[in-house]
Amino acid sequence: MQLSGRGLVCVRGGREVFAGLDFEARSGEAVAVVGRNGSGKTSLLRLIAGLLVPAGGTIALAGGDSELTLPEQCHYLGHRDALKPALSVVENLAFWADFLGGERFDAEGSLTTVGLDHATDLPAAFLSAGQRRRLSLARLLTVRRPVWLLDEPTTALDAAGQDMFAGLMRDHLTRGGLIIAATHAPLGIDARELRIGGAA
Amino acid sequence: MTALAALIRRDIRIALRVGGGALIGVLFFLTVVVLMPFAVGPDLALLSRLGPAILWLGALLASLLTLDRLFMADHEDGSLDLITMSRTPLELACAAKALAHWLAAGLPLIVATPVLGLLLNLDMVATGAVALTLLAGTPALTFTGMIGAALAVTLHRGGLLMAVLVLPLSIPVLIFGVAASQAAITGPLSFGAPFSILCALSLVSLVVGPFAAAMSLRHGLD
């Protein structure tokens, strides 16, 4: 499986964010997108996720499921964590598992992995920023998708959480998945660097 | 289907929990209708003549009250991104969200109508007629209102803008809803003609609403 972009141009609000961007990622490979604030890291992830329309260039996934579009094979972990404060931890997770579909739902298992098994019935409103992030990570584990698009994934995670997350990413890569992560902090795994818009 | 059922279940659950919109809508409906007799005065004949119109206006405003959050909340917390990316067509997801909103916020208004009919000196037949027209007409309010809610997300403006966009679209529903109720109560026109048109308006909006809302959401991706 290979994800590649050729000559991507991104225009936001009439301003060109980046132009002529090429990238490539193969199965089992992680790409760390780096660059200063405003250089278009998030925009690149959203272009791949189909949430932005490129002003030019193409993105293609070779060797994926031919029945599905690229966004349907991606997990997008953005700044906003898509959690409903009124619902409990397990209700939030169960909803995304049902809605996104795919493999059988194992709430307990993935909540234990991310270290939230003691808080399953707690409304998400009472979670700390780090716990919310952990709950979002549980979504990536509950529904299998080959492509992970991660936007500053380690924000708000404590040291133990970052180690746990690095382990999850390594597992994902060994299963043949690929990861594109926009980040300022080290990811904790071997990743090829993709620099956007000059030195940081 | 599991995906849509899950979306409907989630939205209803959120609406019924503390801070959700379902109860607020009914309370607002109650307040608007209770205020009317104080404004109009203790003229029972006048009240019962105005009754259907007051109930319809109250229901219209109450269903608008909670509608602007339909997509805004999902947009703000990032859920809308994941819904857009998912295997479920956005049109169906929009329809499921509107259906959930109608079940949680529209249906309670209809249930409350008989109680409020008492306050407006409406007899059994009149109250029944108004409740029936609301049952047929409120889906049209929700499904056309959904277009406004989607535009509000696209334009990053909530609340009042939505009311300005949606209220003109609901004029036909209001006209035929009140006309059908009046026809059932006083005649001389037949109840069937305006009621059929009301049902037709609902059916059209069920089809057009989801497509227009999904188109607006896709256009506003950013």
Image: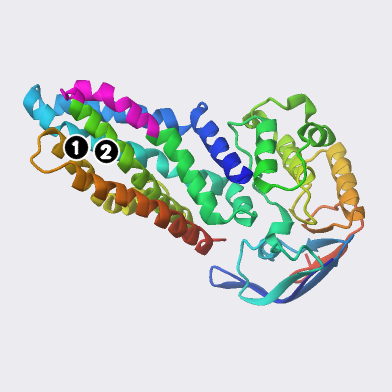
Residue B188 against residue A29 in the figure, above or below: above
Q: Sequence order check: which comes first, mark 2 or mark 1? A: 2
Residue A123: quarter of image:
top right
Q: Which residue is tagged 2?
A: B133
Relative side of B150 to B200, left or right: right
Contact flag, marks 2 and 1 (Cβ < 8 Å): yes
Q: Residue at x 75, y 46 (%)?
A: A143
Provide the secondary structure element on which disc 1 rests.
helix
Q: Are marks 2 and 1 on the same chain?
A: yes
Q: Where does the magenta region start and end?
A: B107-124
- Left or right: B40 as drawn, with respect to B166: left
Name the spot of residue B81 as percent of width and height, x first: 61, 53
Residue B179 can be seen, yes or no = yes
Chain under label 2? B
Q: Nearer the viewer, residue B143 or A40?
A: B143
Kind of element beneath mark 2: helix
Amino acid type, residue under disc 1 in the picture:
Ser
Residue carrying label 1? B181
Work out whether B87 lies above or below B65. Answer: below
- Pinpoint residue A187: horizontal percent, then vertical percent: 85, 52
Q: Amino acid at mark 2?
A: Thr
Q: CA distance from mark 2 to mark 1?
A: 7 Å
